[in-house]
Amino acid sequence: MNDNLLEAKEISKTFGGIVAVQKVDFTIPRQSIISLIGPNGAGKTTFFNLVTGIYTPTTGHITFDGQPMGELKPHEVTNRGIARTFQNIRLFSNMTALENVLVGEHLRLSTGLIGAVLRTSKVKAEERNARQKALDLLEYVGLGGKGDEFAKNLPYGDQRRLEIARALGTEPKLLLLDEPTAGMNPNESASLTRLVDRLRRERGLTVLLIEHDMKVVMEVSDRVTVLNFGRKIAEGLPAEIRANAEVIEAYLGKEYAKTVAEEKGKN
Ligand code: ATP
């Protein structure tokens, strides 16, 4: 088995005259947490869409779990073992938390039409298992006891956790999180960071993260890749990235570099 779950070779994506992603080489080792950072418009979302097969690269190619990625429909992406959460939360707001997770799991159920109509004992057992698994997932992400609440009534931080539980319901190998801590207070962010770390440690998941909160990125990532104007301008350990002059210039800013230097001085 290859150690890399995903490998992208010289991938580019152009829209008309705009080069959104330009000749990017990228790998995601199995059971790693990799972060993608960069200023607005740097190409991060386009990159996510390439990795999830929503876009095909204009040039270059991607392999996932040893297989080439073609252009895939959303359910095919899920079938391949890729799940994601969104920058602007996309839950079924009028369904309960439990139902949202069951929707995620649905793709993995084997019930055919006839079984569903006749409600055979096999189908009933499968439904019971799915329900128990959904309850376990809710508990795991910190939403134990909230299964019957409508998604829209959950506090914002809980909605983000529910999106993760729904993604886990599809039994992914790779989980993509698009700004999972956006809009969270520092306590919620810290707690979500711990959850991401547990996903890898306890469930063996591989995670690709787009995140603007540098505290989260620095704490949880094994490796950070920086995009700017569609190009990869740096890649390395969190400590290397925050000391990288080009990254400070393009994204982190001199203020951030100063704060880091001051913190170092204090320790
Ligand atoms: P943000 O942090 O604001 O989400 P980003 O790093 O995710 O930004 P992208 O959304 O990938 O950046 O955009 C990269 C570039 O590609 C931008 O110039 C954007 O306008 C352009 N772009 C992205 N998607 C499309 C599209 N479907 N059609 C045309 N141009 C696009």
Image (cartoon, grey):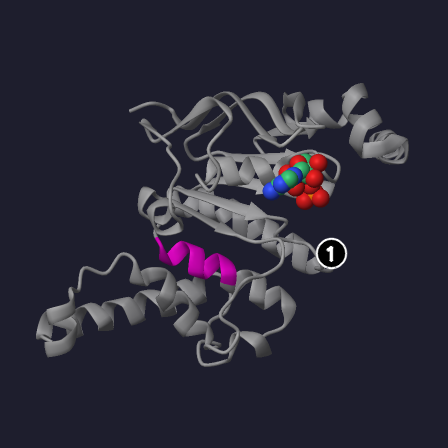
Judged left or right of residue 182, residue 154 is left
Image quarter for ligand 1 equals top right
Q: Find the magenta span and give its range.
A: 163-170
Q: Is residue 203 visible?
A: yes
Disc 1 residue type (three-letter): Pro
Image height check: is 209 above or below 92?
above
Residue at the disc numbered 1: 186
Q: Is residue 218 visible?
A: no
Determine the residue positioned at 46% across, 73% down: 97
Judged left or right of residue 140, residue 184 is right
For residue 159, which quarter of the picture? bottom right
Asked if residue 187 lies in the magenta stretch, the reply is no
For residue 192, which quarter of the picture? bottom right
Under circle 1, the secondary element is helix
Determine the residue positioned at 80% across, 33% down: 252
Q: Main secondary structure of the magenta part?
A: helix
Q: Residue 28's x, y, as percent?
A: 47, 29
Q: Residue 231's x, y, as percent?
A: 66, 23
Q: Residue 101's x, y, as percent?
A: 40, 66
Q: Quadrant of the C terminus?
A: top right
Asked if residue 166 lies in the magenta stretch, the reply is yes
For residue 109, which quarter of the picture? bottom left
Q: Residue 17's x, y, as percent?
A: 67, 28
Q: Quadrant of the N terminus?
A: top left
**What is the count of numbered marks?**
1
Judged left or right of residue 125, residue 243 is right
Image height check: is 211 above or below 68?
below
Query: Mark 1: few, some, or many residues within 10 Å (few <14, many ≥20)?
Result: few
